[in-house]
Amino acid sequence: MDQHYVHGYDGVESLRLHDQASTLEDLLHGDTAYPGGSTILEAGCGVGAQTVALARRNPGVKITCVDVSARSLMTAEAHVAAAGLPRPDFRQADLHALPFSEASFDHVFVCFVLEHLARPARALAELRRVVKPNGTITVIEGDHGSTFFHPDDSDARAVIRCQVDLQRAAGGDALIGRRLFPLLAQSGFDAVRVSPRLVYVDASRPNLAEGFVRKTFTAMIAGIRSPATAANLIDGATFDSGIRALLRTSEADGVFCYTFFKAVGRKA
Amino acid sequence: MDQHYVHGYDGVESLRLHDQASTLEDLLHGDTAYPGGSTILEAGCGVGAQTVALARRNPGVKITCVDVSARSLMTAEAHVAAAGLPRPDFRQADLHALPFSEASFDHVFVCFVLEHLARPARALAELRRVVKPNGTITVIEGDHGSTFFHPDDSDARAVIRCQVDLQRAAGGDALIGRRLFPLLAQSGFDAVRVSPRLVYVDASRPNLAEGFVRKTFTAMIAGIRSPATAANLIDGATFDSGIRALLRTSEADGVFCYTFFKAVGRKA
């Protein structure tokens, strides 16, 4: 599965994910609070970008992290150690066939993972299996189709569509955020509650202009230049124009909007 | 200017605006609170949909409402009376040339108006003229480009684009919400602060599915069938398919998102 992860696995990507996590941590994780003593499964921890936030905000819980990539798990372990946090239990495993018996965890946490899966409902069913009755699942995903900005620009919209198309070609869905409600409901979770988290950026919020628009979102899109042009989704000049237009939205008269979705469901 | 108001002036439209106002009132106006005794100018009050909310939430203020349409002012007066609220001072006037001397009002309030103006910055400059130093302007606008939904549908996106195109042809901008920050800043207001208000609708929020997705947004778009087809922006079959697809998003597994923007600026 490693080769299908559209964002890649190199060091720059790992750094980008950490930049993203620290800028957005309050917005995304501010209301993720588990009772002390809970057992938490973080499914698809990747390089640990969200693990650090989860562990820091929930000091009294026991976290188990699984990921399909052994390399990512090693990076995640190093990040958690560097943050001076207790070491979670790291396990290499496939989300669709977890090495845990039914009702093993009080709660499950999944962040920026379902977007990469061809059958997210199947993964959700497996996650539901390992959570205890009355336990919850928390899912956080972005939605690239939620992006809009000023000045509007057709090349900027085109480079974002390249990311959506590449992710779809790899079996994923970069527009998954908007459909978390039906996904969780159809996977058997009850009392599903979705809350959108709109990241709004203008010149009065320079940290977000730098940390989110430039270093997170545009850096992510800029990273797909080679696969996008190789797949003939776009020509190089249009791609570069689109990236410039995205950066342009972080200037003094620019505005940028992106919406993340956070869903919580309960296993009856 | 009446003939350029893209939403029309008939009774159905007036009812729609009131449905919209009551469904969204908390989201849009919950934090609009003026000190007792303040003088407030509502610029472009239309049929009074927002006037009622403004007056009800700010019982101790003195409101002056202006609109370019005498007919709208009469409807607004009737609505405020029907709500049992004190009668504002209604004045027929052009936003761009107000019959008030400089620094006449403590605060100015403008809701769903700038989107219809060819030169919103000129109107903002005029509004800034009549507000007192240290007074504020509050601007609320939508942004049809912020709309996304599940199931996604190209005809649904096409009918929304028709609305954007018609409004642009009439001199307006249905995407104005995203650029309130630069507009207010460039018009000389200080300490501009914009807060987006995302309306998120899924099956767990049936009142919004009915009141916003069906009765407000889709009803508004459905209302432009004749001008959109007459202008050859779309054929009738595609239009009807788009409307069905928009309504489809309000079903049990559908999701609908729309973002309003509220901006507050100060006159130094």
Image (cartoon, coloured by chain):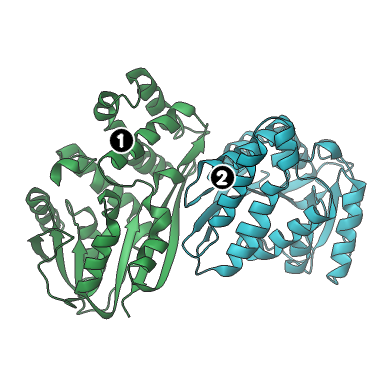
Chain colours: A cyan, B green
Give the left or right position of residue A23, taking residue B203 as reference: right
> Distance of mark 2 from mark 1, alpha carbons?
31 Å
Q: Is residue B159 above or below residue B42?
A: above
Q: Which residue occupies the extreme front position in the image?
A: A237
Q: Position of residue B99 (x, y in %)?
A: 9, 67
Q: Name the residue at 67% across, 59% down.
A: A215
Give the left or right position of residue A226, taking residue B141 as reference: right
Q: Position of residue A53 (x, y in %)?
A: 74, 64
Q: Is residue A251 above or below residue A162?
A: below
Give the position of the C terminus of chain A as an image quadrant.
top right
Q: Chain of mark 1?
A: B
Q: Position of residue A246 (x, y in %)?
A: 57, 51
Give the quadrant of residue A157: top right
Mark 2 vs mark 1, foreground winner is 2
Crowding around mark 2 (Cα neighbors within 10 Å: few <14, some 14 to 19, many 20+) is many
Give the quadrant of residue A37: bottom right
Q: Name the residue at 12% across, 50% down.
A: B72
Q: Position of residue A239 (x, y in %)?
A: 63, 42
Q: Is residue A1 visible?
A: no
Give the left or right position of residue B204, taking residue B229 as reference: right
Crowding around mark 1 (Cα neighbors within 10 Å: few <14, some 14 to 19, many 20+) is some
Dot 2 and dot 1 within a common chain: no
Q: Disc 2 residue type?
A: Ala
In what element is the residue under mark 1? helix
Judge by depth and name the residue closer to the eye, B260 or B79. B260
Judge by depth and name the residue closer to the eye, B181 or B50. B181
Q: Name the residue at 54% across, 68% down.
A: A205
Q: Is residue B32 above or below residue B75?
A: below
Question: Which residue bears the numbered disc 2?
Answer: A156
- Could you say which disc has been placed on residue B219 in the image? 1
